[in-house]
Image (tube, rainbow, N blue to C red):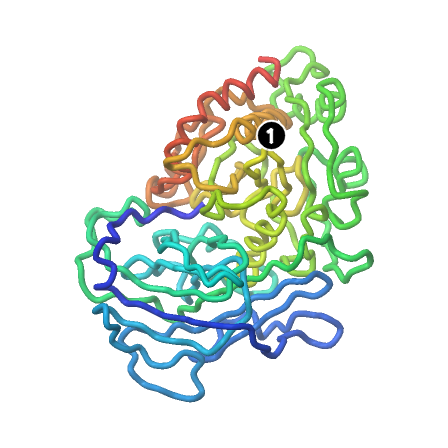
Amino acid sequence: MRALLVTSIGAACAGALLLLPLSPTESADSTLPGGRANPAEDAVPPAGEARVESGTGVPGSTQSLPLGTPSDSTRSVDRLLSAWEDDPSGGRRVASRNVKPFSLVGVVWEDAAAEPRGQLQVQTRASGSGSWSAWRSLETHGGHSPEASSKRSSGRRALGSTAPLWVGNSDAVRVRVVPHKSPTRASGQSHGQERGKAELPGGARLELVDPGPDTPPAAGGKRAPEERRDPGPGAGRDGGEANGETAERPEKRPGGVLPAMTSAQTRATYGDDAAKATPSRSDRPADARIGPRPDIVTRKGWGADESMREKEFSYSKTVKAAFVHHSAETNDYTCAQAPAIIRGIYRYHVKSSGWRDLGYNFLVDKCGKIYEGRAGGMARPVMGAHTFGFNADTTGIAVLGTYTKESAPKAVTEALAKLSAWKLGVHGVDARGKVTLTSGGGTKHSKGTKVSFNAVSGHRDGYVTECPGERLYGELPAVRQQAGRLQGR
């Protein structure tokens, strides 16, 4: 999860303000004949050029609106956004032409190491109601993208980005930049940015995502070919997951849910792999301590368009720890909307931010339902993009919601315990124990530093951030103990 920028917004009008009133309008689709995404559309659009991108086989689209800079005062009929102007409130604003409805919003920019000078905030208007939300902050990485070092066969690089914010069906948005007035935990700064001129990184674009309706992909839809690689722990004889979970062709799985297993079934299926991972911990490999596998909604179940992501997979050697995050930045959703939220985050991570796939390995909604995240095999050590410096040998679990002041539902903590008990158990890890990881670099631990973590940790343990929120973080000790009990420890 992205780091949370902690700042006062009481004097927000002193910052830069973008005002984007809108109503539905038609824009050109940027796909090639046959439904293939145009590779040229993956690049950052030239300044002032709008992009509307649609996936193929699965509904959904992204509107990409260049923001320019608050100091820009040049008008042009060729620009999507008119020049920035003084706002009666004392800030700066700019207006856009009409755009289509959306449900998720974020901002991206060219340099992944850059960050806005000031805090980005948005207001959105619910479709059909004319009611505006309160101003809400967009979290940033603090100058680090979890996917920045990932190599892609397409050659596309990861961009700088805020966290995606789920806002529900909306038909208008306002954006402003508020100067920082105090130190921020998120960016890892030793001192706060002085109050003053708000600025955006070069190539900044507002991304408005429509995840499409809540229907799974049509049978026979066009999919990207998979490249078979070292399957790693948890692989069956055919290179796919045991009990029908096929990593190489997730859309070919039978049904949208990987069913739960009893403890005996789980140990019979994954016990050999766990015993090989920790041969000295058990005199009886058949009694490998793995929690029973819970129900997990597959990528097919939440409607992933497999042609959108990078075709190759990236694996670590093992999984030593699970990092818990929060995402979507809101609890104001129904659990029936969770698949759409995940499709929105997936589209934002891949099409807007330039990531190879959805960043998290798993996601959990507020009703406790577990969802498969990044492709490559749920039991395998798939390299995610979730904790800068510690993506290797870990798995990332994002809870859909925000739990800083509000406690997470019991269903959420129970799901975290069940998932951790199974996933860590497959790799021979005691969910109650400590593990040592080597930092790949970041704001909290320098590159090469060996760091001790709880096997179930929060994002804030590995990165300078408030994630996964104070209340949820406080529940992790109990999650670890419950996961250990499920492992039979």
Name the residue: 37% across, 54% down: 134
- Viewer-side residue, 410 vs 257: 410
Label 1 neighbour load within 10 Å: few <14, some 14-19, many 20+:
many
Amino acid at circle 1: Leu
Point out residue 204 in the picture as x, y percentages from the top left corner: 40, 68
Point out residue 77 in the picture as x, y percentages from the top left corner: 43, 89
> Looking at the rendering, in which quadrant would you find the C terminus?
top right
Q: In the figure, is residue 365 to the left or right of 135?
A: right
Point out residue 155 in the picture as x, y percentages from the top left corner: 56, 65
Q: Is residue 489 above or below residue 29?
A: above
| Quarter occupied by residue 276 | top right
Q: Report the number of discs.
A: 1
Instruction: Say whether residue 88 is visible.
Output: yes
Name the residue: 49% across, 54% down: 167
Q: Is residue 114 above or below residue 462?
A: below
Instruction: Say whether residue 149 is visible.
Output: no
- Viewer-side residue, 19 vs 57: 19
Point out residue 313 in the picture as x, y percentages from the top left corner: 64, 50
The residue where tag 1 is placed is 419
Q: Residue furthest front?
A: 129
